[in-house]
Amino acid sequence: MLRKIKRATLVNGIKIYYLKNKELPIVSFAIGVETGSYFDPKGKEGLFYLTSLLIDKGSDNLSAFKIREFFDNLGAKFNIVSSKNLLVIKILCEERFFERIFDFLFNILSSPSFREEEIIKEKERVISEILQEEEDPDSLIAKKFYEVLYRSSPISHPLEGYIESLKNIERNDIVSFYKEKILKRKMYVAGTGSIDFEKFYKKIENTLGKLRGLKDEFPEFNFRDKPEKIILVLRKKINQVFLRLGHFSLYRRDKDYPKLILSNYILGGGAFASRLFNKIRNEMGYVYSVYSRFFPLDPFKGPLIYSFQTGKNNFKPALELLIEEIKKFKLKGPLKEEIEEAKGFFKGSIPRETETYPQITNMLLSALKYKLNPLFMWSTLDEIIKLKKRELSEFVKKFYDYENICGTVIVPEDYDLSFFKEFFFEHKILEKL
Amino acid sequence: MKIKFKIKKHILDNGLKIFLIPMKREIVSFYVIYKVGSRNESEGKRGISHLLEHMMFKGTEKLKPEEFSRIIQKMGGVDNAFTTEDFTLYYETVPSDAVYKVIEMEADRMQNIKFKEFESEKRVVIEERKERTENSPYGRFWENFSLISYSVHPYRYPIIGFEQDLLNIKKTDLIKWYNTYYSPDNAFIVVSGGLDENRVIKYMERTFGKVKKKKRVVSQNFFEPEQKGERKMILEEKGMLKILGISFQIIPFNHPDFLPLSVFSSIIGGTESSRLNRILVLDKNLSNEVSTFCEEKIDNGLFIFYSILNKNSNFDDVIDVFWKEVEKIKKQGIKETELNKVKNMFSSEFLYRLQSTSGRAYMVSHFELHGILQKLFTYLDEIEKLKVSDVVDVCKKYIKKERANYLMLC
C-alpha cells in the first residue's frame, strides 16, 4: 500500500505527497513551512515562536475561543508545532469533516488578526513558560545545550526567546514576520486518509494554491566545523547531576546518514541494547537514563547528544565511564554481532513506524522537508543492511569526537567541581554564557 | 457511529485469559497484564511492584540480564513495561513472525525470574525516583497531590515508593511478591495485529499453559473513610512555578456514574474550548494551562483539576473561577451544544485509537481489567444516550466543597 504514494506540485511550487488508506474513515495531514526561529532578528529572539502561537488566537472574524471550539466540535486534533527550522500545522480528523476543516484552516491562516490584547496575553504566557523551565532541570539543560553548541549563530537562542527580547517585540514585527517569513516561505503538504487523492489535491489547490512568491532559501551562515570547547555549569537546588555533552552531527541529506543511524544505535541510541545503557545503567547502576541521540536540523548540521542524570556521588565514575565508552567505540569500532543485531532492529522498524495515519503523514513530511524520496525509509534501510563492518568502523573513527565536545551540566548548589575542571582541563568552564 | 472489531477469548486451564484481536498488519502488539500495582502494597515496602517490574528484565534461567529486550530489538521490535496503582503491564511490538519467541520468553519470565543484579537495579530505581520525582517540580507536585487526596487508601502513596522503602526491600520480599501476584490466574494477555489465531493459541497452550498457578491471590478491599471536610496543602518552593491542583474522590471506572462524570470533566475543563480554558487561559489569562480529568481506577479514583498559573496570578482567583463554574453548572445546567461537542470528541477519539495494534490492545486491556469488556462496543452508544441532566447530577453528587483537596505549589 505504501508504494502507492501520489505526488503533485502546484503552480506556486507547493509539493504534495499523499497516500490513500481506506482502513478507517480518517484523514491526517500536515502543512510544513520552511521557516523557523533562525529568522528571529537579533534583540527580538522569540519572534517566530510568538507569531506561531498567535496564528490560531483569532482571525478577522473569529475569536481564539471560536477557533478552538470549531475543531473540538468536530472532534478534530489540531496543533501547530514550531522549531528552529520548521513550522508544521497538523490535523487529524474524521473523513466527513475534511473539507470543512481545510477551508476553515485556510481562513485562519489567511487572516490572523494579531490583536494587541492577544499579543500581550501570549507574551505573558511565554514569559511564564521561560521562568517555569528554569525550575525543571530536564527542560533547562536541553535549552542551554543548544545555546552552547550553536553559540553565536542564529539558531543558538531558545525558541521562546528571552524575557528581555520578548519585551522588544511589537505588533508590527509580528505582522510583517507572518507575511514575509511564514506566508511567503516554501510550503509542502503531506497527508494520508480515506478520501481520494483528487479531492485532497483540489482542496489544497483551491486554498494554498493561491499563495504566490514562496521562497525556500535560508540565508547563508558560516557555522563552525567544531563546537567551541565550552562547558556551561548551572547550579540548582537538586540532588542529582544532569549532564549533556555533544558535538555537531550530519545533514539529513549526507550520504553517511545511514552510518550515523546504525552506529548511534550501537553506542547509545538503541535503548536496552546500547553500550552506554548496558555499561552505565545495567552493570553499574549509576543512572536511570543514559543515551546518545541525534536530530536532523537541515539546512544546518544537527546535534549529537550524550546525556545522563546521576546521583552526586556517582557523577565522577559515570562521566569517566561515558567518555571511556565513546573512546573505546571510536578506537575499536562496533563488533560484528552488534552490527547484525542493530540491522535486525531496523529491518523490523518500518511497519511499526508507518502504522497510524499521523505516522505516515510524518514520514511523508520528512521526505518533503529533507528532499528525500517518499519511500526514503526503505532506501535508507537498504543502505543500512548493506553496510560493512569496515566502513562503519571508519565512519565511527571519524565521526564520534569526544575531544571536541561541548556541553552543559546542572549540579547541586554546593557541588564541588574540582574533579570536573581537571577532567575537562582543555575546556573553558563557564557559569554564565 | 457503530464500531466493532473481532476479539477472540481463550482461557487456559491454569486460569490465564487470552484475548486475540486479528488485524491486517505485519506487526503484533503483545500485552501481558498482571493485576498488581502499588495499590496492593503496604507500609515500608512501597514501590515493590515497580521494582519487580525492573527485575523482570534481569533474566531467567535461560536468559541473561537484559537479554529479553536485546532479543526483542534484534528481531526488529520494541518492548517496555510500566507499573500503575492497579496493574503492571509488559508490552512488545514485534514483526508478526516474532510473536512465538515473545510468547516463549514471556511465559518463561512468568515463572523463572532469577533476581540477578538486584542491588544495582535498586540503585537505578532510586536514581529514577530522584530524576522524575525529587528533581522535577511536576514530580514533587503529583507525589504530594496523591498524599493529600486520600487519607488511608494506598492510592495516596507513590508508585515508585520512597527512597527509604526501596532501601528496605530485600530480595526475599521481591521473591515473595512475585510468587504471590505473578500467577497465571492473576494475569491476562492481549495480542493484536497480524496473527494466525489458532497457531498462537496452540503455542500459548504449550508455553503459558505449563505455568503453574502460584499462591492463590486473595482479593483485597481497601477502605477510604468518607471525607468530611476540605484539605489544603501549600508547597512553598520559592520558585517561579505556580501549580494548583484540586481533587475529589469519585468512583471506580466501572461505576455507571463514571461516564457522565467524564463528560462533565470534558465540558468544564477537559478540552481547549472548555469553560475553564476559555475563562482562565483565553479570556482572563490567569493560567497558562488548564486541564480536568477523571482517573480510571479499580477503586475510587479522583476527579482532578490541574492548572499552571501565570506568574502574576494568585491561587484564590483561579479557585474562585473554578467554583463559580461548578456552581453555574449545578444551577443552570449545561448546553446541548456542549454535550454534543463532547460526544463528538469521544467518538472521534475512539476511532483514532483503533489505528494501531497497541491502541486496540490497550483498549481491550483497560476494559478487561475493570471487568467490563462487554461494554467496549456499547461505550459510544452509552455516550450517545447521555442527557444534560445525567451530567448535572454527577456534578452535584461528587464535586462538593467539603470533599475538595487543594495543593498549591509556589
Image (tube, coloured by chain):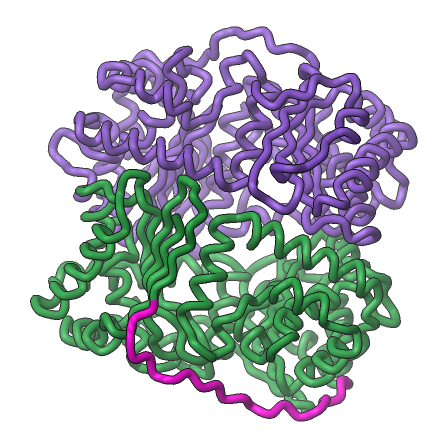
Where does the magenta region start and end? B210-231
Please identify the dominant SS of the magenta region.
loop
- Identify which residue is drawn at 64% across, 87% down: B185
Using residue B145 as the reference point, say whether residue A272 is left or right of it: right
Q: Residue B185 versus residue A189: which sits nearer the camera?
A: B185
* Residue placed furthest toward the left: B332
- Which of A430 and A342 lies nearest the eye of the viewer? A430
Front residue of this view, candidates A338 and B98: A338
Chain seen in green? B
Residue A26 x/y as whole percent? 37, 52
> Is B295 rendered above or below residue A127?
below
Residue found at the very far right of the displayed protein: A332
Residue B187 shows in the view: yes
Viewer can see residue A401:
no
Tell me the colour chain A is drawn in: purple
| Picture coordinates of residue B391, whole percent (x, y) | 20, 72
Q: Quadrant of residue A378?
A: top right
Tell me the quadrant of the picture where the C terminus of chain A can be found. Answer: top right
Residue B220 lies in the magenta stretch: yes
Where residue B234 appears, as percent x and y from the top left, is 38, 57
Relative to A50, residue B62 above or below: below
Task: Specify the quadrant of the image occupied by residue B406.
Answer: bottom left
